[in-house]
Image (cartoon, rainbow, N blue to C red):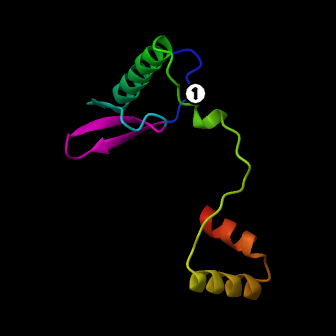
Amino acid sequence: MKNDHYSYRITWSEEDQEYVGLCAEFPSLTWLAPQPEKALKGIRKLVAEVVADLKKSKEDIPQPIATKNYSGKFLVRIPPELHRQLAIQAAEAGVSLNRLASAKLGS
């Protein structure tokens, strides 16, 4: 599992009564285990196997989120009335609409 830079998360599954290992870059993969450490170990091993299979078959391998470059820009479409409300809030706060939206998204 050298160079394993994928984004993992462990959560409890009430339905399964076990911990679930997840990988953001491979959303269809999961691993159940009675302890969180085993769920992490299991999902990492499963991802390594899938990556090896993808390499073998010369298929695209997802890039780890941690190694992607982000511009800091993205376009969001909202209803005109919400746009107006946010513009008013920004003006009343004495900040740009961009600063207001960034603060709201970050909270």
The residue depicted at 20 percent of the width and 40 percent of the height is 16
Q: Quadrant of residue 33?
A: top left
Q: Nearer the viewer, residue 58 or 85?
A: 58
Q: Name the residue furthest front.
A: 58
Residue 11 seen by the camera: yes
From the viewer's side, name the closer residue of 12 and 54. 54
Examine the rendered structure and indicate whether residue 94 appears above or below residue 8: below
Which SS class for mark 1? Answer: loop
Q: Where does residue 26 sit, x and y in percent of width and height?
A: 44, 34
Q: Which residue is mark 1?
A: 5
Residue at x 59%, y 37% (from the top left corner): 65
Is 34 situated left or right of 100 in this image? left
Quarter containing the C terminus: bottom right
Which SS does the magenta portion mostly show? strand
Residue drawn at (74%, 49%), measured in percent from left and top? 71
Please determine whether, in this image, residue 49 is positioned above or below residue 69: above
Q: Residue at x 35, y 29 (%)?
A: 39
Q: In front: 71, or 80?
A: 80
User: Does residue 64 show up magenta in the picture?
Assistant: no
Three-letter code, disc 1: His
Relative height, residue 103 to residue 25 (above, below): below
Magenta range: 8-24
Q: Residues within 10 Å of mark 1 (few under 14, many from 20)?
A: few
